[in-house]
Amino acid sequence: MAKPYKHATLICLILSILAVIGIVIGVMVENPLPVIFLLFPTVIYEVYRTEGASTKWASWVLLIVLIAEVVFIISGIGFDIAGYLGEETLNVSGYDVPLGDIKVVAPALMAVLSVILFMRTRGVYTKWLAVIIFITAFVIVYTLDPTIYNRMLGIAVEEAVYEIQ
């Protein structure tokens, strides 16, 4: 059964504003934590709104990855996944996630999960939330490592061109 949508437009608008505030602060101070903390309400609302098996799974994994990202950044945990796996990318549902430091891989995975949510959901509000998460994940990567951001942006453009064709 569909979730109530009486206040969904207002909630999504407020979550969009919070994301923009987080993005502006995070980029200004060159720190991903403000971006991440102001993204939490969006991800939690996405978990609440999703209903299908694959979208519910994707939204819960997204929340877990976001929590893990906070732990990685605050505790200073970092290791090179690419070196550990011996691969430069990881294929997740047909999308290549660039590998490197775990702190950068987590938001890259969040971007992929948001694309999965966008593609597999029918709800306008869950799509809206997925777009917020997608954009914010890119900003998190940018605040962590602008060079990986450029690689991710290239992959996103390639995927968009492929989907359009």
Image (tube, rainbow, N blue to C red):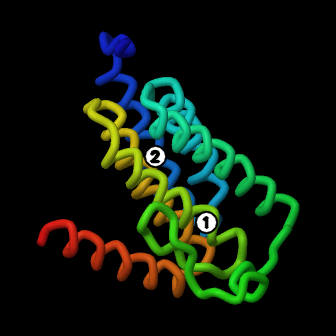
Label of residue 38 in the image: none
Residue sitting at x 34%, y 72%:
156
Residue sitting at x 62%, y 79%:
99
Q: Nearer the viewer, residue 30 or 39?
A: 39
In this rendering, the answer to whether 159 lies above or below 151 is above
Q: Answer with mark 2 or mark 1, whichever residue precedes in sequence.
A: 2
* Kind of residue indicated by mark 1: Val
Circle 2: element type: helix
* Position of residue 157 measured from the top left corner of the image (x, y, whole percent): 28, 76
Circle 1: element type: helix
* Rendered image quadrant of residue 120: top left
Q: Is residue 43 left or right of residue 133?
A: right
* Residue picked out by circle 1: 29
In this rendering, the answer to whether 113 lies above or below 63 is below
Q: Using the rendered image of the protein, determine whether residue 142 is visible from the camera's viewpoint.
A: no
In this rendering, the answer to whether 72 lies above or below 8 is below
Q: In this view, does 73 lie to the left or right of 115?
A: right
Residue sitting at x 54%, y 79%:
98
Give me the C-alpha separation between circle 2 and circle 1.
15 Å
Q: Locate the C terminus by quadrant.
A: bottom left
* Position of residue 100 measured from the top left corner of the image (x, y, whole percent): 66, 81
Label of residue 19 in the image: 2
Q: Dot 1, crowdedness within 10 Å: few (<14), some or many (≥20)?
A: few
